[in-house]
Image (cartoon, coloured by chain):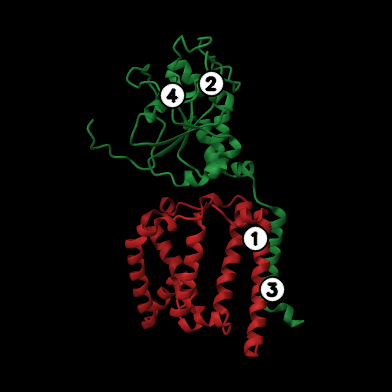
Amino acid sequence: MAPYDLVGYFGLTGSYLIYIAIGFAFGFILESSGFGDARRLAAQFYFSDLRVVKVMFTAIVVAMTLIFWSTALGLLDYNQIWVKPTYLWPGIVGGLVMGVGFILGGYCPGTSLVSVATLKIDGMFFLLGHIAGVLVFGETVDSINEFWNSGHLGFFTLPELLHLGTGVVVFLVACLAIAMFLGFEWLRGAIYGKTQ
Amino acid sequence: MNRIFKPQVLGAVILLSASGALALYGQPDLEQKWQFMAPEFEPRLLERQVQIDPAELLSLMNDDYISLIIYDVRSERDWNEFHLVDSERIALEALPTQRERLRALPENGVVVVVSNDEMLATEAWKRLMVLARPNAYILEGGLNHWLNIYGLPADEAGGGRAASLARADGTLRHSFKLALGDRHAAAHPDERHAPQREYTPRVKLLKKIAKAGGCD
C-alpha cells in the first residue's frame, strides 16, 4: 500500500535517482506550460491568458481524484500523506501577501525557480528576494508568535467544513473547476473580445 | 458534432465521470481500512510482537528518554477505580481526535494502549494503526495482569486474589475498597522495589536514543 518507502526498496542512490526523474518531469511540464514566464503568469490576473490556471487546477483535480480513488481501493493510505494543519488567520494573511507578491513580482516561489532554470534575470532577482524574505521571517517570527499560531483548527479539510463525504466533495470540486474554466473563458471573451 | 470530441471536452467528461463515481463509491471506513492494512499489520498481532510485558511498560514509565503516551480505553467506571499514573482515558470512538498528535510524535515517541484484558486495547491498536501508524504497543494481559504482578496492598484491595488471565472477558477482575484512580500504589510502582521479571523487550524506537549526560 502506498506511499512506498523508496529508500527501503531501492536504497539511497536508487531513491535519489527516482526523485531526480520526478523532479525533471515536473520541471519539464512546468516550463513547457509557461510557468517560467512572468508575463504569462501575471496574465492570469488580467484574464488575458489562462493556461497556467488551467494547468494548475487540472493538476489539482486530477491528483485529488486519483488520491481518493486509490484510497477507496486500498492502494494508498491517505493518513500517511502529510496534510498541513490549518492556522486560519495567518493562512489568510499569508495568502494575501503571496497574492500581492505574485502579481507584483510575476512569480510565486516555485515558479521563480522554474524561471531561474532558464536563466531569466527577473526570476533570479525574485528568488534572491524570496530567500531574503525567508531569512528575515525566520529571525522575526518569534515576535509574532501569538499571531503565527492563531486560528489553529488542526487537520481541517473541506469534508469537515462542509460535513459531506469525501467523494462528494471531490465531485463538487471537479464541477467547480470545470465551471471556473468555462467562466474564465467567458470573462476573457467579454473583456478581450476573442476566444482561445 | 466535432465540438464534443475536443480533447478538453473529453477530459472534462472523464473527470466528472471519475469523480461522480467516487462520490457514489465513497471512502473506506476504519474497519475497511484495517482490512486493507491487515496483511501488513495483522502478523505483528498474531506473533505477539506488539504485546509488551508489564515490566517493560514500567521500564518505559521510568525512562526519561522516552516520550510515552498511555491510552486507557476502558470505561469511566473502571478508570475511576484504578488507572496508571499519566495514562489518558479515551473512548475508542474518540481516537480519531488524536490523529494529529500521533503524527507529530517524536522519534522517541511510544504509545501503549491498555484495557482490562487485551481485547479492547487490540481494537484500539488497530484503529491507531489505521489513523497514524504510530509506534504503538498493547499491555500484555491488560491491567488485570498488571495488578496480578504489582498488586494492591491489603488495605486497598477488596478481594485480594489474583485475576485469572485465562478468563479474558474484558472486565476488571480486581476489586478495590475505594475508587482511588491513580492514587493506588500499583498505579506507579517503584521500579527498584517492584517484583523483577524476565521479559523479551518488544519496544523498538524509530531512532536510537543516546543516553548520556545528566547526573545519574
Looking at marks 3 and 4 on the same chain, the residue that comes earlier in the sequence is marked by: 3
Q: Secondary structure at mark 4?
A: helix
Residue type for callout 3: Leu
User: Relative to A20, is A85 above or below?
Assistant: above
User: Relative to B215, is B3 above or below?
Assistant: below
Q: Could you tell me which residue is drawn at 51 percent across and 50 percent down?
A: A80
**Residue receiving disc 2:** B81
Q: Could you tell me which residue is drawn at 66 percent across and 72 percent down?
A: A178
Q: Nearer the viewer, residue A120 or A41?
A: A41
Q: Is residue B2 left or right of residue A128?
A: right
Callout in the foreground (3, 4):
4
Report if the CB atoms under discs 1 and 4 are less than 8 Å apart: no
Query: How far separated are the C-alphas under marks 1 and 2?
Result: 47 Å
Query: What shade has chain B been given?
Result: green
**Residue receiving disc 1:** A170
Callout in the foreground (1, 2):
2
* Chain in red (letter): A
Q: Secondary structure at mark 2?
A: helix
Report if the CB atoms under discs 2 and 4 are less than 8 Å apart: no
In this view of the protein, can residue B11 be seen by the observer? no
Query: How far separated are the C-alphas under marks 3 and 1?
Result: 19 Å
Q: Secondary structure at mark 3?
A: helix
* Chain of the residue on which disc 2 is drawn: B
**Residue receiving disc 3:** B10
Q: Which quadrant holds residue B185? A: top left
Q: Residues within 10 Å of mark 2 (few under 14, many from 20)?
A: some
Residue type for callout 1: Val
Looking at marks 3 and 2 on the same chain, the residue that comes earlier in the sequence is marked by: 3
Q: Secondary structure at mark 1?
A: helix
Q: Which quadrant holds residue A189? A: bottom right
